[in-house]
Amino acid sequence: MAAGVGVRPRRVRTAGESRSVPAPENSVPRPRAACLAAPMTSVSALGPSGTPPHVRHAVRADIDAVLAFWREAAEGTSISDDRAGAGRLLDRDPEALLLAERGGLLVGTVIAGFDGWRCSAYRLAVHPAHRRQGVARALLAAMEDRFASLGGRRADAMVPEENTRAHGTWGAAGYVREERWRRWVKPV
């Protein structure tokens, strides 16, 4: 099936409030992304020239919709793509999973993880019918604002080697490929 044909974005069941994060004492103030304000309630789906999508933090009630969304819109699956894994993420860092919505529909996600040392980006996914409409840009801006507010200095993104479309997205956002490092993994 062609991207975006016959595939509908999942409806998000909740519209949880976003919470502000106090900036560390030594951080440089950055303007917060306007899209992290109040939950969106009645804006219709808009195209490239319209209003940016609403970005908010996920809540537990979003987990099933997020997992279904990743099966439709994300590149591949992960060992952590289940209710328990997503629940642990939200328990550990309730503001790490960012959701983009348009008209109450989940249209994009990114995990913005910060462990106090590194800023890590995972699961940047945009629904095929909403690509090239500013969704990834809004998610990355919110992610970078979160990292800056926590004192982060550099973001690292996990991007599958074969996902060349994603390479263009990350490159357009100012990220550069790190040639010196490779990821080493082992299930625990």
Image: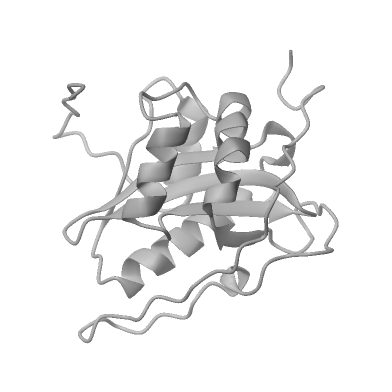
Count of marks overlaid on the render:
0
Residue at point 41% right, 35% down? 84
Q: Residue 56 location in percent, x, y?
A: 57, 61
Q: Give the quadrant of the N terminus.
A: top right
Q: Give the quadrant of the C terminus.
A: top left
Q: Residue 162 location in percent, x, y?
A: 41, 19
Q: Colour scheme used in the picture?
A: one colour
Q: Residue 123 location in percent, x, y?
A: 45, 38
Residue at point 38% right, 26% down? 160
Residue at point 19% right, 29% down? 183
Q: Is 121 rendered above or below residue 41?
A: above
Picture quadrant where residue 3 is located = top right
Residue nearest the viewer, comparing 174 with 44: 44
Does the image show residue 112?
no
Judged left or right of residue 182, residue 97 is right
Q: Is 64 rendered above or below residue 94?
A: above
Judged left or right of residue 181, residue 148 is right
Does the image show residue 56?
yes
Q: Residue 137 location in percent, x, y?
A: 56, 54
Residue nearest the viewer, comparing 165 with 15: 15
Please identify the residue farthest to the top as the structure is shown: 1
